[in-house]
Image (cartoon, rainbow, N blue to C red):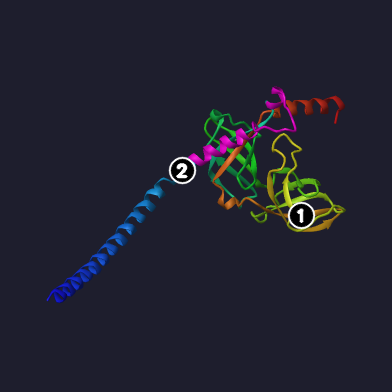
Amino acid sequence: MFLILESISIFLAVRNTEKTNIFTSSANFVSGLFNEKISFVGNYFQLKHQNDILKAENELLKNKKKELPDNRFNFSKEIENTGYFYHSAIVIKNSVHKPNNLITLNIGRSEGIKEDMAVISNSGAVGVVSSVSNNYCTVISLLNSKMKLSAKIKRTNYFGSLNWDKEDYKYIILSDIPDYSSLYKGDKIVTSGFSSLFPEGITIGTVYEFEKKNSFYKIKVKLNQDFKNLKYVYVVDYLGKEEQTQLEDSTIQLFHF
């Protein structure tokens, strides 16, 4: 009798445990799924806030970069005051299919923005500030036939002139690279630094195809920045620009270039 009763008890306990586990497992699955969806919705509404945090951190890191110790050089305070500083901004208007495309940013004179400041993104060069109001500025895009930029082959340092041919927004033309220089498809194209606008070495794109023309290469460059997907940028403030420009202008006047 004892064995019979014990067997019945074990059977009932196992059956009830299985039912309990099934119920608990189902409840946990539904609860987990519900919490996952709630978390997803919450994260979605936090995206703007998180993006603002990331932009501020990137701006801070770019400005702090020049403060990192470098054992090779010791700069005076006067030279330190000629460095580059970065202001984060958001693209609020953009075009890519016009002959002379412009970009509008949500940052202006009140944030220290001036004409002729370079504009870059995390992917590469974007353009140059053209006009500034208190809270906004317009930018001459690289996709503007009137925009010319000094650029070079990163591997060889040969430099030339970059200009859009008004064809495809994914590509731009680099000219004035001598045809005796080494050139390969896939070579990286960066800013030369031979102006008071862009720092040296900002990515522009890669060599897509090229042909020889009158002792020079005509190079089709695939842009690193997709201008159809441009949202967050940085306006570059070069503190030494005014001094450099004044010196160059006075030299031109002195020698009547």
Q: Nearer the viewer, mark 2 or mark 1?
A: 2
5 in relation to 43, above or below: below
Q: Among all residues in the image, which is located at the extreme left?
A: 1
- Measuring from the top left, give residue 40's x and y in whole percent: 39, 53
Residue named by callout 2:
50
- In the rendered image, the quadrant that contains the N terminus is bottom left
User: Which span is picked out in magenta?
Assistant: 53-80
Task: Judge by depth and name the residue closer to the eye, 12 or 97.
Answer: 12
Q: Is residue 72 covered in magenta? A: yes
Q: Is residue 89 covered in magenta? A: no
- SS majority, magenta: helix
Mark 2 → mark 1, Cα distance in angstroms: 40 Å
Residue at 51% in and 41% down: 54
Residue named by callout 1:
219
Q: Residues within 10 Å of mark 2 (few under 14, many from 20)?
A: few
The local secondary structure at tag 2 comes to helix
Q: Amino acid at mark 1?
A: Ile
